[in-house]
Amino acid sequence: PPCALLLRAPSRRAFLLCATACGLAFFLLSFQVHEKHLLLPLLPAALLSTEHPRAYAWFALLAAFSMFPLLARDGLRLAYSVCQLAFGALAAALTPPMEVGGSATAGGLLLAASLAGMVALHVAEAALPPPRRYPDLHAVAFSAYACCHLVGAYAACLHTLWHTTATAPPHTPLDGGGTTVRERRKAE
């Protein structure tokens, strides 16, 4: 779907949204995917971070969160914790305050609830040992939580791409200034 939407109305923003959605789809639907493959959609998402800094910060924190079982197995809990806390604090300090009311508040509440769930899973992993029958319970919980949120991120990316291609005028880098070839021909 993202590529078809991009072909319908190409633009720079739509291309970045399409690349993010395709990277997320690749990660979510691949067979034997490695956790590090989640870094693929982070690059185009980083280029969109000026438009939605809070959403990008959440996505970056979620990507690192999904890699926690792998990092914990390699003995990198402290490094992970320091990096997550530092990035979260930096993102909170650099993003503008949210306006009260409307979808901005609802989106902020969803992001806060998601981050609270991540913290709760970390606390549960540190405080509660897994049952002997299910030694990988914490790793599965982290993976399932991250998967649900990544599916939501994919859906949000598709929704934004759909809205962008439906409302923004199509243009390519060769058009010059965002006008379409048809518009320039009519002007001549």
Image (cartoon, rainbow, N blue to C red):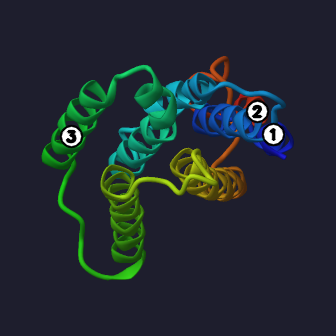
* Residue 129, label in figure: none
Q: Which quadrant of the rendered structure holds the C terminus?
A: top right
Residue at point 73%, 41% (across, down): 28
Residue at point 34%, 51% (across, down): 54
Residue 109 x %, y %: 35, 73
Q: How many marks?
A: 3
Is 162 on the left or on the right of 42, as rendered?
A: right
Q: Is residue 160 above or below residue 172?
A: below
> Hey, what amino acid is under mark 3?
Leu
What separation in Å lies between label 1 and label 2 (alpha carbons)? 5 Å
Residue 149 x %, y %: 57, 56
- Disc 3 residue crowd, few under 14, some 14–19, many 20+, Cα 10 Å: few
Residue 156 x %, y %: 61, 57
> Which residue carries the number 1 mark?
29
First in sequence, mark 2 or 3: give its number. Answer: 2
Q: Nearer the viewer, residue 129 or 139?
A: 129
What separation in Å lies between label 2 and label 3 (alpha carbons)? 28 Å
Tell me the quarter of the picture where residue 23 sits.
Answer: top right
Q: Nearer the viewer, residue 143 or 135?
A: 135
Is 91 on the left or on the right of 60, as rendered?
A: left
> Which residue carries the number 2 mark?
26
Residue at point 84%, 47% (across, down): 1
- Disc 1 residue crowd, few under 14, some 14–19, many 20+, Cα 10 Å: few
Tell me the quarter of the picture where residue 22 sits.
Answer: top right
Of all residues, the one furthest to the front in this rendering is: 132
First in sequence, mark 1 or 3: give its number. Answer: 1
> Hey, what amino acid is under mark 1?
Leu
Can you tell which of label 2 and label 3 is closer to the viewer? 3
Name the element at disc 3: helix
- The reply to whether callout 1 and callout 2 are in contact (CB within 8 Å) is yes
Residue at point 77%, 39% (across, down): 6
> Which residue carries the number 3 mark?
85
